[in-house]
């Protein structure tokens, strides 16, 4: 018989990491039995600094995470990592390879790495990533880094889920117009330009700084309207170690600037709001599919022959759905 | 609601041949499983540590080096120590026939040796997880 999730929570709160792993699996499976237990974990959490790290595929996110974790560990803080990779849109399976670049961390009990697949969730996060964050938070981890899938221009959910959002750009991937487009670059609390041992990194740093300066001059109405936080650009190199210490210090500074202020409190409320809607949406989706899947097959057949339209069909599905 | 089967594939020790394990990873992915691959040259301690954190259903060890009679007992012992004896351990690669029985005796659930068709690998894992039941 499977252990009740509430028992796992009791073990988790005593620091049992085996229980942490099992609870994460139950969260991922969308287990109804685990919902109340995960609720209890949520209430026990709330101390950790949650850092979101995002960027295009190949920008060096996993490598940077590995270096960040090492540096944060030097002052004794415990670090959790939720590393997300994509699921196949065809089979639903995945290959989760982020651990390869973090192999130097695997034997440290102050580091917990969990790989997760997106399972059809868009936006860069896995559906149960935030439950996993709560679990590590409640188990006493001080900093929790969520590494998103490699993103394009528009996957910005991470900013609604983390206290500090780091956007990683790699040199050589676009001109200064890329830097003023809407989307991913707007969500950064901290910009990182990775691989800055490369010659063209300075150009990318300059483009980002110019973009940020433009934003400040446009949005600030008078001279006294100083922003509480000016988004910095940090150049890092995993190769030489350059900038890693500065990045950790900048993360800590961002946390401090937000921790006790009204701005920070507002952010926590927005995170809570996002979390509530997201959880409700997932519940709605899974119950909707469970209660309509049989009827959908017949409707799809008729819609594909254009005897029925998707608008009328969804009205019909919604009108008798058991939620 | 059910979840994809989670598998950790590991190359342990001084064994640099990973073409096979990558083909297996791809096969399992295409069968709808979540596959965590840890890269080359891991120690038994690292592999067990990762398997516990990832809470995998199956730990697949790929061995072409001939060190299976040293490495497998270590892994089985470490799993038991970590309260993770319910992890299904499967070995793939090159293992002489006479070592199959001793490996099974120490708790390796199945050996999928050279020339095992991909479909059989998938079916074996699905069967072993079904036999274990929910956890």
Image (cartoon, grey):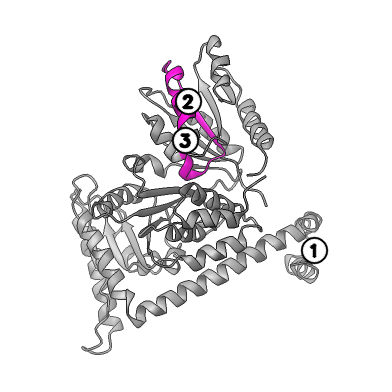
Instruction: Give the residues drawn in magenta, as a range.
Output: B51-79
* Discs 3 and 2 lie in a common subunit: yes
- The reply to whether residue A74 is in sight is yes
Say whether disc 3 or disc 2 marks the residue closer to the N-terminus: 2
Percent position (x, y) of residue A267? 41, 76
Instruction: Name the side, left or right, on which A169 lies relative to A267.
Output: left
Q: Nearer the viewer, residue A33 or A147?
A: A33
Q: Nearer the viewer, residue B47 or A85?
A: B47
- The reply to whether residue A176 is in sight is no
The chain containing the residue under callout 1 comes to A
The chain containing the residue under callout 3 comes to B
Residue B56 among magenta residues: yes
Instruction: Name the side, left or right, on which A249 lies relative to A258.
Output: left
Q: Residue at x 24, y 49 (%)?
A: A195
**Foreground: disc 3 or disc 2:** 3
CA gap between label 3 and label 2 equals: 22 Å
Where disc 1 sits, the SS reads loop
Residue A165 among magenta residues: no
Quadrant location of the N terminus of chain A in the rendered image: top right
Percent position (x, y) of residue A239? 22, 44
Question: Circle 2: is it few (<14), some (14-19), or many (20+) Cα within 10 Å?
Answer: many
Question: Circle 3: is it few (<14), some (14-19), or many (20+) Cα within 10 Å?
Answer: few
The answer to whether marks 3 and 2 mark residues whose Cβ atoms lie closer than 8 Å is no
The answer to whether marks 2 and 1 mark residues whose Cβ atoms lie closer than 8 Å is no
**Foreground: disc 2 or disc 1:** 2
CA gap between label 2 and label 1 equals: 52 Å
Residue beneath label 3, please? Answer: B81
Residue beneath label 1, please? Answer: A308
Q: Residue at x 32, y 57 (%)?
A: A168
User: In terms of image quadrants, where is residue B7?
Assistant: top right
Where disc 2 sits, the SS reads strand
């Amino acid at each position: 018989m499977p252990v009740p999730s509430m028992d796992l929570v009791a073990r988790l709160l005593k620091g049992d990491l085996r229980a942490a792993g099992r609870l994460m699996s139950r969260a991922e499976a969308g287990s109804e039995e685990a919902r109340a237990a995960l609720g209890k974990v949520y209430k026990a959490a709330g101390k950790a600094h949650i850092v979101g790290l995002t960027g295009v595929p190949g920008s060096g996110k996993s490598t940077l995470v590995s270096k960040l974790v090492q540096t944060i560990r030097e002052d004794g803080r415990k670090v959790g990592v939720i590393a997300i990779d994509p699921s196949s849109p065809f089979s639903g399976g995945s290959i989760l390879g982020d651990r390869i670049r973090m192999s130097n961390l695997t034997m440290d009990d102050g580091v917990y790495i969990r790989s997760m697949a997106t399972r059809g969730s868009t936006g860069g996060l896995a559906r149960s990533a935030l439950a996993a964050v709560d679990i590590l938070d409640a188990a006493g981890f001080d900093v929790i880094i969520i590494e998103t899938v490699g993103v394009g221009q528009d996957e910005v959910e991470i900013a609604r889920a983390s206290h500090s959002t780091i956007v990683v750009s790699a040199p050589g991937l676009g001109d200064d117009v890329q830097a003023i487009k809407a989307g991913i670059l707007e969500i950064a609390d901290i910009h990182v330009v990775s691989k800055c041992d490369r010659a063209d990194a300075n150009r990318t740093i300059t483009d980002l700084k110019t973009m940020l300066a433009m934003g400040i001059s446009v949005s600030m109405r008078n001279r006294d309207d100083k922003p509480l936080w000016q988004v910095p650009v940090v150049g890092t190199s995993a190769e030489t170690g350059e900038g890693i210490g500065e990045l950790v210090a900048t993360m800590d500074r961002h946390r401090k600037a937000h921790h006790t202020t009204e701005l920070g409190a507002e952010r926590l409320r927005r995170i809570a709001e996002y979390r509530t809607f997201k959880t409700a949406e997932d519940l709605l989706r899974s119950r909707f599919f469970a209660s309509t899947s049989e009827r959908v097959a017949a409707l799809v057949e008729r819609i594909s022959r254009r005897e029925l339209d998707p608008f009328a069909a969804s009205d019909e599905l919604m009108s008798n759905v058991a939620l | 609601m059910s979840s994809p089967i989670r598998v950790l594939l590991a190359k342990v020790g001084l064994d640099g041949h990973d073409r096979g394990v990558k083909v297996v990873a791809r096969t399992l992915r295409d069968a709808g499983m979540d596959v965590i691959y840890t890269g080359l040259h891991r120690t038994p301690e690292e592999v067990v540590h990762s398997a516990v954190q990832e809470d995998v259903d199956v730990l697949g060890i790929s061995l072409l080096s001939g060190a299976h009679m040293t490495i497998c007992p270590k892994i089985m012992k470490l799993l038991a120590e970590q309260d993770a004896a319910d992890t299904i351990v499967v070995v793939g690669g090159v293992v002489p026939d006479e070592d199959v029985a001793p490996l099974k005796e120490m708790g390796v659930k199945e050996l999928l040796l050279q020339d095992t068709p991909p479909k059989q690998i998938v079916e074996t894992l699905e069967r072993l997880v079904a036999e274990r039941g929910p956890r």
